[in-house]
Image (cartoon, rainbow, N blue to C red):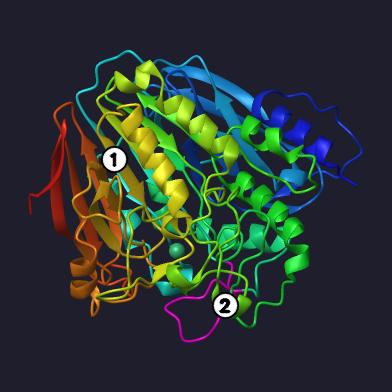
């Protein structure tokens, strides 16, 4: 029986060194292409990066030694670093090689070898040195890639965007069973056990367009609910629909399995995994929230709005999960004790925002799962709000905007996902007063494929929520945000048709924000 302590030890060991003695474990036999799930890189620092792969092993219970190489050139003639890692069966034969000693702000090529098999070549980069001036940082933000809702053409087109990094904001997989009549089939039933999650990731990771984008540059990762279960909140189960066979009382175990599988399939540092697998509560956790600095150009905070949130309040019919709510009839709505990030993360964020080297950078980017600004769905007097996102945690949202003002955090730009629609808006100090101060701007991105609600009600929703200047719930794709010292230019890129593998791409709209002036200007 593998204990949590063993997993932690293995994660640490497999990330760095060759340490296991040869044992009686049966020799692992690799699949025809052991690298069929591709390669990926992520968690970059100015001197290191994590290289990921997961071996497809046909039989056997032994660990497999995997070699990795990092080079300046695609032919691997100028090798910078090389080493070995153990692909452990208890971690689904995943590899998380943490490569240090790299130069800041520089591109590298990497590949893996296992036995006679060699992986495809990935390209990655380190972050700029913390004190380096940076002329340009070009980053896509994307979320919500429901397999059954379409093909991943968006990832194919993103390859041509010449990006420094991808910011993925959640819903990497969905936990639903395969059903007929959809654009394509993930196969399998409800995703509940560790084996289920691993199989579902393997389906997604098998997609050539997704693989190609992982190969192209490092990814920075947030997660949302569907990596575990629709609308879950902390350790409270969500609600994936009437046929979901999972039991809410078993949710902690399900979440632990989902978090482990997430780690196994993402280029995360072993420390993010181990810190938390040792949680005393019996439920695994994973340290996802973190800060990256893009030289002197920007600070980038990634937030985790799922793992530590308080349960939603006043969901209809007392059900689990989320629903629209009339706040006037929900006494718990404005309870200031409720948090979306949890007390520890709120404290960490405030301390980080208050740092002098945050104030000294030009842009302050906050990457998180969902739309930030208030979206009142009810035209005219009265309100109907979702209790799932920041709207359901209005006091916590106010604490965050208060901190941004109090610490004079420069040029906040919030990036989000989750709602399967583009929402572009001004971040307000007080969403209850249209005339209140503008604190920053927000770009909530549409889905890669997941179905949106359509545009029928959008004109009246925009009129009801004038802090938003643009919305579209019909198109799918991603956003590209290009930061320079003087401005950020954001393009909303959309595919013609998610039902077609060969869909084209176009620009739906483009916005410019000048540094020092939080006003969205329409550029295209
Ligand atoms: Fe989603």
Instruction: Give the farthest residue toward the bottom.
Output: 181
- Dominant secondary structure, magenta: loop
Give the x, y percent position of residue 515.
16, 31
User: Is residue 223 covered in magenta?
Assistant: no
Q: Which residues are magenta?
A: 175-187
Residue found 92% across the figure and 38% down from its top = 24
Name the image quarter holding the C terminus.
bottom left
The CA distance from mark 1 to mark 2 is 37 Å
Nearest-to-viewer mark from 1 and 2: 1
Give the x, y percent position of residue 319.
62, 75
Q: Secondary structure at mark 1?
A: strand
Q: Which residue is mark 1?
A: 413
- Is residue 502 shown left or right of residue 186? left
On screen, 455 above or below 107? below
Q: Quadrant of residue 2?
A: top right
Residues 266 and 112: in front is 266
Give the x, y percent position of residue 165.
35, 38
Q: Which residue is mark 2?
A: 178
Label 2 near label 1: C-beta < 8 Å? no
Numbered-mark total = 2
Crowd rating for badge 2 (residues with CA inside 10 Å; few <14, some 14–19, many 20+): some
On screen, 149 above or below 303? below
On screen, 381 above or below 423? below
On screen, 42 above or below 201? above
Q: Quadrant of residue 478?
A: bottom left
Q: Quadrant of residue 315?
A: bottom right
Q: Secondary structure at mark 2?
A: loop
Residue found 72% across the figure and 46% down from its top = 284
């Amino acid at each position: 029986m593998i204990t949590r302590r063993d997993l932690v030890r293995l994660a640490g060991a497999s990330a760095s060194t060759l340490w296991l003695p040869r044992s009686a474990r049966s020799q692992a036999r690799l699949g025809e292409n052991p690298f069929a799930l591709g390669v990926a890189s992520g968690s970059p620092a100015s001197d290191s990066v994590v290289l990921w792969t997961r071996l497809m092993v046909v039989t056997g219970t032994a660990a497999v030694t995997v070699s990795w190489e990092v080079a300046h050139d695609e032919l691997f003639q100028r090798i910078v670093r090389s080493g070995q890692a153990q692909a452990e069966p208890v971690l689904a034969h995943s590899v998380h090689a943490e490569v240090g000693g790299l130069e800041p702000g520089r591109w590298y090529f990497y590949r893996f070898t296992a036995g006679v098999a060699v992986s495809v070549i990935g390209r990655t980069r380190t972050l700029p040195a913390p004190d380096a001036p940076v002329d340009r940082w070009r980053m896509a933000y994307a979320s919500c890639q429901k397999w059954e809702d379409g093909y991943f053409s968006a990832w194919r087109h993103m390859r041509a965007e010449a990006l420094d990094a991808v910011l993925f904001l959640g819903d990497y997989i969905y936990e639903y069973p395969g059903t007929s009549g959809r654009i394509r089939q993930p196969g399998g039933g409800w995703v509940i056990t560790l084996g289920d999650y691993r199989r579902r990731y393997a389906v997604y990771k098998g997609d050539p367009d997704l693989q190609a984008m992982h190969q192209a540059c490092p990814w920075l990762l947030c997660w949302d609910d569907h990596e575990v279960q629709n609308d879950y909140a902390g350790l409270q189960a969500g609600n994936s629909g009437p046929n979901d066979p999972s039991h809410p009382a078993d949710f902690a175990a399900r979440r632990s399995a989902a978090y482990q599988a997430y780690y196994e399939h993402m280029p995360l540092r072993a420390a993010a995994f181990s810190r938390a697998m040792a949680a005393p509560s019996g439920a695994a956790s994973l340290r996802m929230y973190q800060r990256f600095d893009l030289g002197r150009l920007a600070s980038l905070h990634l937030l985790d709005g799922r793992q530590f949130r308080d349960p939603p309040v006043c969901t209809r019919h007392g059900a689990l999960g989320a629903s629209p709510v009339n706040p006037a009839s929900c006494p718990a709505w404005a309870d200031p004790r409720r948090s979306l990030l949890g007390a520890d993360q709120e404290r960490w964020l405030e301390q980080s925002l208050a740092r002098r080297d945050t104030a000294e950078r030009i842009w302050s980017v906050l990457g998180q799962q969902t739309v930030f600004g208030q979206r009142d769905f009810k035209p005219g007097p009265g309100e109907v709000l979702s209790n799932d996102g920041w709207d359901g945690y209005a006091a916590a949202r106010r604490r965050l905007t208060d901190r941004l003002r109090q610490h004079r955090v420069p040029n906040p730009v919030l990036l989000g996902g989750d709602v399967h629609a583009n929402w572009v808006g001004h971040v307000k100090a007080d969403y209850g007063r249209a005339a209140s101060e503008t604190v920053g701007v927000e770009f909530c991105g549409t889905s890669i494929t997941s179905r949106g609600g359509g545009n029928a009600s959008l004109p009246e929703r925009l009129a009801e929520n004038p802090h938003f200047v643009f919305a579209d719930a019909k198109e799918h794709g991603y956003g590209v945000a290009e930061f320079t010292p003087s401005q950020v230019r954001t393009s909303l890129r959309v595919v013609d048709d998610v039902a077609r593998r060969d869909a084209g791409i176009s620009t739906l709209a483009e916005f410019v924000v000048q540094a020092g002036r939080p006003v969205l200007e329409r550029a295209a």
